[in-house]
Amino acid sequence: MKREQLSDIIGAIDDRQIAEAYRFDPALCGRSPERIGNMKAKRIVTLALAAALILALGVGAYAVYNRRVQDLVMKAPEPEADVEIVGGEENIAVVAEGEIALVDENGDPLPAPEPEAEEPQAVPYDPLSGDTDQISLQGFAGSPEYQAALAWAEFLHSYDRDGSVLASVGNGPTPWTETYSANGYSVYSQEMADTIESIAAEYGLTLHSGFASASIDELRDRFGDFCNNSHQGSGYCYDDGTFMCDGAFDGIAYQIRRCMKGVLDTVGLNVFDAEQYEQWEYTTAGGETVLLALGPSKALILAESDQSFVVVNVLAGANDSLFYGADGCISAAQLEELADSFDFGIL
């Protein structure tokens, strides 16, 4: 398949499916904090300081990536079973987990009433369907960005379940289109607008603005050479520096999303089963430490800095690929090569 064909294919993909380290100074290990008459005691103190420094080095270097893909999973709240008794003594309806059973005074079941025909309703997007693992692309669990994205996902999970609000709005522009929908937020009512503003304020975050489509070359011109010239693709960006791009490198299709810290971003990614990923730390050719995760049908590259959280969603896994089936799977070495082609220091 030609690069142009590959680029056209990935351009149609939905993006939803998508510590400071201590510096080691050898000279410090030979000094004690004060003069100690007993040389043996001096050596013990020196060794203790060196051991503490080495421990600090280990903790600092791996503070970001002692987390795993599982720490990005956004879990849906457990459903509550509502039990209620309605009706009189001769006609009792027991409501449990959405099911209704009608019985007479002797406890014998009565035939269920015929359901009334309903007009089909639009179904709103549910980021926490529970069928597969959805992960945050904003940061690991506990970060303000993760918590805010989860709070919004939980709101959507319980809001407008029958789609009636969405159906009443229709497909045309709404009063919330320019501010929210045009900048990646699924907002189609004043209640939704008030909720997302409240979540952003609670976690001290701002909202996206200034959406713009951009080729990968335009993204590089704007944000720096975060990948080499062998990459092809296109995507979009916001004024705050968050961007997403469908790309291809050496026949490997991927999606990269950089979410800036301090911004409420709501895009999630389906990873199927987070427990099935083989994960390891890797230091790229540019000297940046990233987390690599290789699953059966897709792979991930995760990188975090003080300014951003980056996820590369690789559309191929150890056993399968989106485009080529078993013939297009990716190896651990290829995943490391792909990671080497990015400059995560710029991202």
Image (cartoon, rainbow, N blue to C red):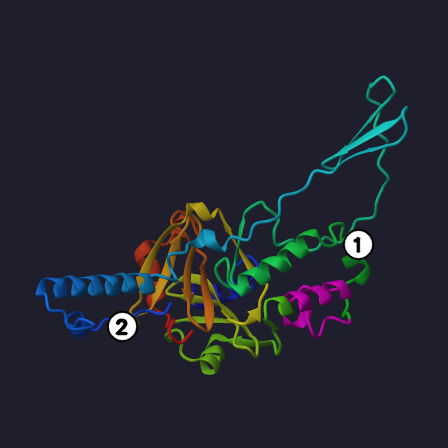
Q: Decide if residue 210 is on the left or right side of residue 278.
A: right
Q: Is residue 162 above or below residue 243?
A: above
Position in image of residue 128 (x %, y %): 61, 51
Percent position of residue 296, x then y:
42, 47
In the rendered image, is residue 153 in sight? Answer: yes
Observer-nearest of 119 and 307: 307
Q: Quadrant of the C terminus?
A: bottom left
- The answer to which quarter of the image holds residue 32 is bottom left
Label tally: 2
Q: Which residue is mark 2?
A: 23
Counting residues from the start of the chain, the first of labels 1 and 2 encountered is 2
Residue 17 coordinates in the image, percent (x, y)? 55, 57
Near mark 2 (Cα within 10 A), the count class, few <14, some 14-19 or many ≥20, is few
User: Considering only vertical position in the picture, is 200 above or below 314?
Assistant: below
Span of residues in magenta: 175-199
Q: Is residue 182 magenta?
A: yes
What residue would you read off at disc 1? 164
Judged by depth in the image, the label closer to the viewer, 1 or 2, is 2
- Residue found at the far top of this picture: 106
25 displayed left or right of 125: left
Q: Which mark is residue 216?
A: none
Query: Is 306 part of what is drawn in magenta?
Result: no
Asked whether residue 322 is in view, the answer is no
Horizontal and vertical percent for residue 299? 42, 55
